[in-house]
Image (cartoon, grey):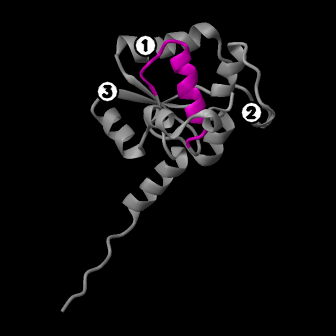
């Protein structure tokens, strides 16, 4: 299931939020970001603070989905996280139902998170969304925030 290629622009718009919107929803206590990258990706590139890690490829396998060749290659590149159905559904239910949170899926670039949001919606979690731009957008935002202010001309 390659959601990115099968979604119309209108469907994509209903599944996606911008990173600033996602961060504001989290700040307001209305949402939780779920980092769906593989463990090795987080170790190599870094983690986003205050996210819940649920690797999507292990979830897809656990649910009986067939992985694409690219997905399998990414899964094989690292040490899979041992996730079972009870842990997965307990975590998702605590966030979605108990806290009444939006589930904001984030990956590296925003492509896999579309698939994850679509998968969660198919499992009965209608408040699942994808964060556009993913970790790359988050890194750019962090770099912009850390950049020194442009000096003003003194005269």
Mark 2–mark 1 CB contact (< 8 Å): no
Residue 70 vs residue 13, the one in the foreground? 13
Camera-side residue: 90 or 103? 103
Question: Of marks 2 and 1, which one's residue comes earlier in the chain?
Answer: 2
Q: Position of residue 148 (x, y in %)?
A: 36, 69
Q: Are marks 2 and 3 in contact (CB under 8 Å)?
A: no
Q: Which residues are magenta?
A: 110-128
Residue 36 seen in this snapshot: no
Q: Where is residue 142 shown, x and y percent of the image?
A: 43, 54
Please give the name of the residue rendered at 51% of the width and 10% of the height, measured from the top-left corner.
90
Q: Give the residue pinned by disc 2.
A: 71
Q: Residue at x 40, y 66 (%)?
A: 147
Give me the C-alpha separation between circle 2 and circle 1: 27 Å
Q: Which residue is mark 3?
A: 30
Magenta residue check for 42: no
Q: Secondary structure at mark 3?
A: loop
Marks 1 and 3, how far apart at CA: 13 Å
Residue 59 in sight here: yes
Instruction: Provide the secondary structure element on which disc 1 rests.
Output: helix
* Residue 27 drawn above or below residue 155: above
Q: Which mark is residue 7?
A: none
């Amino acid at each position: 299931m390659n959601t990115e290629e099968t979604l119309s622009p209108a469907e994509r718009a209903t599944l996606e939020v911008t990173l600033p919107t996602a961060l504001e929803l989290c700040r307001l206590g209305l949402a939780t970001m779920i980092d769906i990258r593989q463990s090795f990706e987080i170790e190599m590139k870094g983690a986003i603070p205050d996210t819940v890690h649920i690797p999507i490829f292990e979830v897809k396998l656990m649910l009986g989905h067939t992985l694409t060749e690219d997905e399998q290659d990414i899964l094989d590149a690292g040490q899979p996280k041992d996730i079972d159905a009870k842990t997965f559904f307990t975590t998702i239910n605590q966030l979605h139902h108990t806290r009444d949170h939006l589930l904001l899926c984030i990956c590296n670039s925003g492509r896999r998170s579309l698939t994850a949001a679509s998968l969660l919606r198919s499992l009965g979690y209608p408040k699942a969304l994808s964060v556009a731009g993913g970790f790359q957008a988050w890194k750019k935002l962090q770099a912009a925030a850390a950049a020194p202010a442009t000096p003003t001309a003194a005269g």
